[in-house]
Image (spheres, coloured by chain):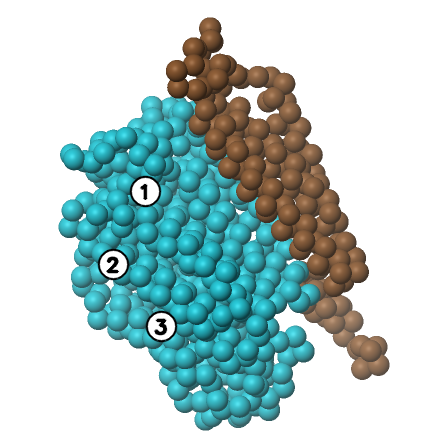
Chain colours: A cyan, B brown
Amino acid sequence: MIRVLLPLPIVLPLLGAGLAVALGRHQRLQRLLSVLTLTVCAVVAARLLHLADTAGPAVVQLGGWAAPAGISLVADRLSSLLLLVSALVLLAVLLYAIGQGAADGRRTTVAVFHPCYLVLAAGIAMAFLTGDLFNLFVAFEVMLVASYVLITLDGGQEQVRAGMTYVVVSLLASALFVTAVGLVYAATGTVNMADAAGRLAELPDGVRLMLGLMLLVVFGVKAAIFPLFSWLPDSYPTAPSPVTAVFAGLLTKVGVYAIIRTQTLLFPGDSVTASILLVLAVLTMVVGILGALVQDDLKRLLSFTIVGHIGYMLLGLGLYSVAGLAGAILYTVHHIVVQTTLFLVAGLIERREGTSSLARTGGLQHVAPVLTVLYLLPALSLAGIPPFSGFLAKLGLIQAGTADGGALALLAVAAAIVTSLLTLYAMARVWSTVFWGRVAPVVPDADLTDALEVGTARTPRLMLGATAFAVAGGLSITVVAGPLYALSGRAAADLMEPATYVRAVLVPAPGALSR
Amino acid sequence: MSGNLTLALTVGALYAAGTYLLLQRTLTRVVLGLGLLGHGANLLLLQAGGSAGGVPFVGAPAGASGVADPLPQAMVLTAIVITFGVSAFLLALAYRSWVLTGEDDVQDDVEDRRVTRRQRTEDAPVVRPEDEL
């Protein structure tokens, strides 16, 4: 059964995308198709997670070619957990986008939106599931090509400018990725990650370090870590808010996942890389959050907090212990949900006020109490206030850091605490300017990215419902924190012991077809 | 693995030219630069398979130097198709930018513009409103 189940999260959205193009004129059918596809994907992902947790990594060799030559799909605990979370987030944002599209009724862009969105979902699923370095490149490209179209969906001057930055930076990273894959192949003669893990260990230290750092740079661009993040706050805020929300939640996390996967599987226990990661974690956290403090635009402010909080995940990886990785995994899950939610709320605010400028909004708590609550909960969670999920994830990371006890680890812990406080300050600044104070007169921007009914009290119920669903998702992380942290711990233990992964990929299970 | 020096030098030249063009301000040159960089990367991936050899068909007799490694060739084909599609999109985007702004330059960064404006107001503390207009 696994041979059917495992490729489904990739194949289904691709099929759905094709059908959605064909259904371009029938918007109701198109919407139904997208929702149905992603719902099935979420169910499949949940089943995969259960299988991976109880029976070890599930492996399928595509096309019947045995592992080192063919492409392997692997669902272990980490990849299936992230797959499940991403499927749920994609679903919530899709509902939000449908609510917005139905309210605004712009036919052309909406018809393109659904196919691209499904291709994006397929790319993300493929990046999580693949066990092959070159296939990972293809997955990134599938995901990025869909994102190029989505980010320039409106085709206005601002979108084209931002899209150009985004596309050029991504393409440069892709060229580097191909280079890195070529060099790995030249050095080891394989691109299958499980196979390469063994062969890379036999290489001279210098060559290994060079390959490891090259892959770190490639994924660092996608994940927006310190010196390579400047494209993110510049390009994300111009896209329509559902698109920004899903990019903010998922695209950077796919980069983080790729860093975690390659560093733990291909280059395990390299002390130089670990120190570099910790230094980068400190710089990413501090520089990102300082950038957020001075922004006037809500979406730009939130974009900078993405950068700052990527640092936490690097911190967990840089510690290179089970506790650190468990914290990083829990943090990734928390951040995917909460950051997406905040961007959805920002979209609702912009829709209502006609602007996302902090200076020109105010007193929203008097006129939109529901929106106020929807903002407050994820904002407190992002800042790490107990008992929200952000607090639990940060606590796990900080405990892992102090348990490590090294000078760099302690410095990173200090930076993490400072960043957390500064995040609270940034969130409180939004709170006092947007929600407190006098009700500001509505002055819409000249270039609205989301066509809207500015200043009306009506928000489409579906948009509000989808946002509430996302907020509830963030809260439920707290409720299931015990089992979730235990699962993250088991996933982290898997990462620290790559032998199980390697064996599952290279040695076919008894009864499985080898050709 | 033995390499081919001509190909290696070509890869180097393509990377150098691509990087140079990428640093230009004109969008067309940036697009061309990315194209060259992509070609360089693809050629490097092809090189990774080692020297040329016989056709890697099942049942075909192997030459004296053995068969060529088919895997990098398959990967390069995929990479070429991806580069092609993305370049087309990038060209369309550059064209759109030209239609909208009437120039072929990379537009200024929003933040840069803001910083420059702030710098200007700090340098000249006495600013009469009519100067702003």
In this picture, residue A453 sits left or right of residue A459: right
Q: Name the residue carrying label 2.
A: A46
Image side of residue B110 versus residue A203, left or right: right
Is A69 placed left or right of A443 in the picture? left
* Circle 2 residues within 10 Å: few <14, some 14–19, many ≥20: some
Instruction: Name the quarter where the C terminus of chain A is drawn.
Output: top left
Name the spot of residue A9 as percent of width and height, x first: 34, 53
Which of the two residues, A390 or B17, is positioned nearer the viewer here?
B17
In screen coordinates, is A168 left or right of B62? right
Q: Would residue A400 be visible to someone looking at this image?
A: no
Asked if the residues shown at circle 2 and circle 1 are in contact, with their CB atoms under 8 angstroms apart, the answer is no
Q: Residue at x 54, y 63 (%)?
A: A112
Chain on which label 1 sits: A
Are there few (<14), some (14-19), or many (20+) residues within 10 Å of tag 3? many
Amino acid type at image mark 3:
Ala
Q: Earlier in the sequence, mark 2 or mark 1?
A: 2
The residue singled out by tag 3 in the image is: A470
* Relative image position of residue A193 (x, y in whole percent): 35, 35
Residue type pointed to by label 2 = Ala
Does residue B30 lie above or below A293 as drawn?
Answer: above
Task: Determine whether the residue tagged by mark 2 lies in a helix, strand or loop.
Answer: helix
Q: Which mark sits nearer the N-terminus, 1 or 3?
A: 1
The amino acid type, in three-letter code, at marker 1 is: Leu
Seen in the picture, residue B78 relative to B105 is either above or below; the reply is above
Image label count: 3
Q: Nearer the viewer, residue A58 or A276?
A: A58
User: Does the image show residue A22?
Assistant: yes
Q: Nearer the viewer, mark 2 or mark 3?
A: 2
Tags 2 and 3 on a common chain: yes
